Image (cartoon, coloured by chain):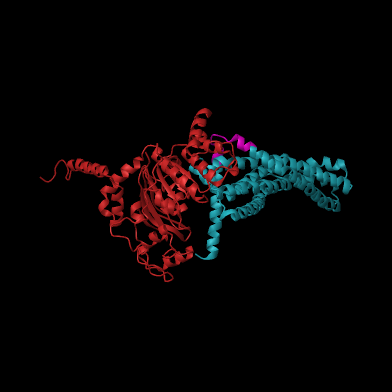
């Protein structure tokens, strides 16, 4: 087999393994006993490392969008819709992505490193030999925790992002506070919020899954653990933007814009 | 009693690289076996195939009539409950105390109360001499203690088969000797089948009932300890004596280069010695050995600590070996006979007489040629 063909089959095999594990994880979520304590521990850990970075990223993100849109809307004389546009962008696109970047970067990398070092210390093998499935015992709680944190953090990031946008629009661009607030519901609608939450759930699941998958399959000792942590973050980011693109296209197709 | 493990034609490769192929051996029930081999010959991989952690491409591993290589995931988990595995560094769960580690299998697989669990854990901790260190975390104890704690965890579900991956690595000679004694004592008490994977010659010479050796992606030899310890096959003799000269080189690349130059299917031991090593006739180390004497490599086997019951495996093994004595080469046969007492031979004779008195049906009871 030639080198490119081998590379392609290698990539396909990895994705196949990832999908197989996704099915195992989903099946494992409904298997007893539920690892309640582990879920809470992991949830707490991921939340504690993600909240502050997420908030700090959300403020400038919301601000940049508002600033950009502010000058644009002013040029075409649509200043009063500034708030509506920024809300739409922050809630639907920026917030789920920011949330998952932080969950994958802060929580996912830690999960990956933890599972990776356990694998090379043979703890995972020992667990299998003792008749305990590491998927059910370790991976499922982590994926559930990452999903839940992403879904909840998404709400916070939306609020913080919109507040950041409001602040910069009103203070820096001399926008009208009333117009900004009253235009919120001019373009945005409830399904926008739902699709944002669905995105966050899915992205959180992916972040946890990719981190766990890479963590359980390190190559070649301690250096391999460093490599898979690196890979897990990169793979999550790539998947994230791709899946976001797909969901956005489907959403815009099936949910008509307000007033259309 | 222990369980017999039958391995037939096992082959494993990672990608295009074959680790070993066509490994066939039987671990007799309740006996202690050692699998030897230079570093990098896939001993640990073999162990992982035995417990079903890795799936070999070819061959079968039959335990209790179930082929571990082709059975469903659910059966694999059932069969694994027969196993206790001691991993190289103990493989304790780093976030749990030693006590919780040892109690883990009980809490997962049994409905015992905490009080019962405590009693079992403490008895196993006593067995491996770890009492007093229960509350420590794995990171706070020495490598030898981690190994013993790992052994306690492997023992807690009363396994029928115990696998040890390099129990001696990272231990000083005294600790290694103590651990070897511990394994023999465990065998006397539990009568479990034990397989030890190692490259420690002292362990290989003194502990097992059976020895095997992996080299150049094949199982060179597997059989009673007397067979390998008196063997004059160059690879086996070189390894068991720790000599520089012989077919085993420094790097695995050299070994595999020699391997690929060899016609497939040829006996690995039949190769002439490498050009860089002076030709050395077998048995050249002890040219003065009188004919019929037992070579000094055949050291007496380790006995259980006085006070423990005798190993039942020894009795079964003697009977088994006497039956197949004529298949062994002369030095091995002499080695086996040297371990037999008068009573053993008498016992064998009565057994033979009794079994030969039983008529063996050579034709079908009805409608045979009359």
Does B184 sit above or below residue A219?
A: above
Residue at the limit of the structure toward the right, as seen here? A174
**Residue found at the very far left of the displayed protein:** B370
Q: Is residue A9 left or right of residue B208?
A: right
Q: Kindly give the residue lying farthest to the bottom in the view shown.
A: B275
* Residue A37 belongs to the span the image colors magenta: yes
* Figure colour of chain B: red
Which is nearer the eye, B31 or A183?
A: B31
Decide: is B116 above or below B34.
above
Q: Magenta stretch: residue A206 in it?
A: no
Q: Quadrant of the C terminus of chain A?
A: top right
| The quadrant where residue A32 appears | top right
Colour in which the image shows chain A: cyan
Q: Give the image location of residue B15, x and y in percent.
A: 48, 59
Q: Nearer the viewer, residue B236 or B8?
A: B236
Give A91 or B273, whichever is nearer the viewer: B273
Asked if residue B359 can be seen in this view, the reply is no
Q: Which range is magenta?
A: A26-40
Q: Judge by depth and name the residue closer to the eye, B305 or B138.
A: B305
């Amino acid at each position: 087999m030639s080198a490119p063909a081998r590379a392609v089959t290698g990539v396909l095999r990895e994705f196949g393994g990832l999908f197989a594990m996704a099915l195992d994880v989903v099946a494992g979520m409904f298997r007893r006993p539920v690892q309640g304590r582990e879920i809470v521990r992991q949830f707490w850990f991921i939340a504690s490392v993600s909240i502050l970075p997420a908030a700090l990223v959300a403020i400038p993100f919301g601000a940049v969008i508002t600033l950009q849109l502010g000058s644009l809307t002013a040029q075409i004389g649509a200043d009063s819709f500034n708030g509506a546009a920024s809300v739409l962008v922050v809630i639907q696109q920026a917030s789920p992505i920011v949330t998952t970047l932080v969950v994958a970067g802060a929580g996912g990398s830690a999960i990956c490193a933890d599972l990776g070092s356990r694998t090379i210390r043979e703890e995972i093998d020992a667990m299998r030999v003792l008749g305990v499935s590491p998927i059910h015992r370790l991976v499922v709680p982590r994926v559930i925790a990452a999903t839940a944190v992403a879904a909840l953090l998404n709400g916070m990031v939306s609020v913080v992002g919109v507040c950041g946008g409001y602040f910069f629009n009103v203070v820096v661009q001399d926008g009208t506070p009333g117009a900004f607030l009253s235009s919120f519901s001019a373009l945005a609608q409830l399904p926008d919020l739902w699709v944002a939450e669905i995105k966050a759930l899915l992205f959180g699941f992916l972040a946890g899954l990719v981190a766990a998958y890479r963590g359980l399959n390190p190559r070649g000792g301690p250096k391999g653990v460093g490599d898979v942590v690196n890979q897990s973050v990169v793979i999550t980011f790539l998947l994230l933007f791709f899946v976001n693109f797909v969901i956005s296209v489907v959403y815009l197709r099936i949910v008509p814009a307000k007033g259309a | 009693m222990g369980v017999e493990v039958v391995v037939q034609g096992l082959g494993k490769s990672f990608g295009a690289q074959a680790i070993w192929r066509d490994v066939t051996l039987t671990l007799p029930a309740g006996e202690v076996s050692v699998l030897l081999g230079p570093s990098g010959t896939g001993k640990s991989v073999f162990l992982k195939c035995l417990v079903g952690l890795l799936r070999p491409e070819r061959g079968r591993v039959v335990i209790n009539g179930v082929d571990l290589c082709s059975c469903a995931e659910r059966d694999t988990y059932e069969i694994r409950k027969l196993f206790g595995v001691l991993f190289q560094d103990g493989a304790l769960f780093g976030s749990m105390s030693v006590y919780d580690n040892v109690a883990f299998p009980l809490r997962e697989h049994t409905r015992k109360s905490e009080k019962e669990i405590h009693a079992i854990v403490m008895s196993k901790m006593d067995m491996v001499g770890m009492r007093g260190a229960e509350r420590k975390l794995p990171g706070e104890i020495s490598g030898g203690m981690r190994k013993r704690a790992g052994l306690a965890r492997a023992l807690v579900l009363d396994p029928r088969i115990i696998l040890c991956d390099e129990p001696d690595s990272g231990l000083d000679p005294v600790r290694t000797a103590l651990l070897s004694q511990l394994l023999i004592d465990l065998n006397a008490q539990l009568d479990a089948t034990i397989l030890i994977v190692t490259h420690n010659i002292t362990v290989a010479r003194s502990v097992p009932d059976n020895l095997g050796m992996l080299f150049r992606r094949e199982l060179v030899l597997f059989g009673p300890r007397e067979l390998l310890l008196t063997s004059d096959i160059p690879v086996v003799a070189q390894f068991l004596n720790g000599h520089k000269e012989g077919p085993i080189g420094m790097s695995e690349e050299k070994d595999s280069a020699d391997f690929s130059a060899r016609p497939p299917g040829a006996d690995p031991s039949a190769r002439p010695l490498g050009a860089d090593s002076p030709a050395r006739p077998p048995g050249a180390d002890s040219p003065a050995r009188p004919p019929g004497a037992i070579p000094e490599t055949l050291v007496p086997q380790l006995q259980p600590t006085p006070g423990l019951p005798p190993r039942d495996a020894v009795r079964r093994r003697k009977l088994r070996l006497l039956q197949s004595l004529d298949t062994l080469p002369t030095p091995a046969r002499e080695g086996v006979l040297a371990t037999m007492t008068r009573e053993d031979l008498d016992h064998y004779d009565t057994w033979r007489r009794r079994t030969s008195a039983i008529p063996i049906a050579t034709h079908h009871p009805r409608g045979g040629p009359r």
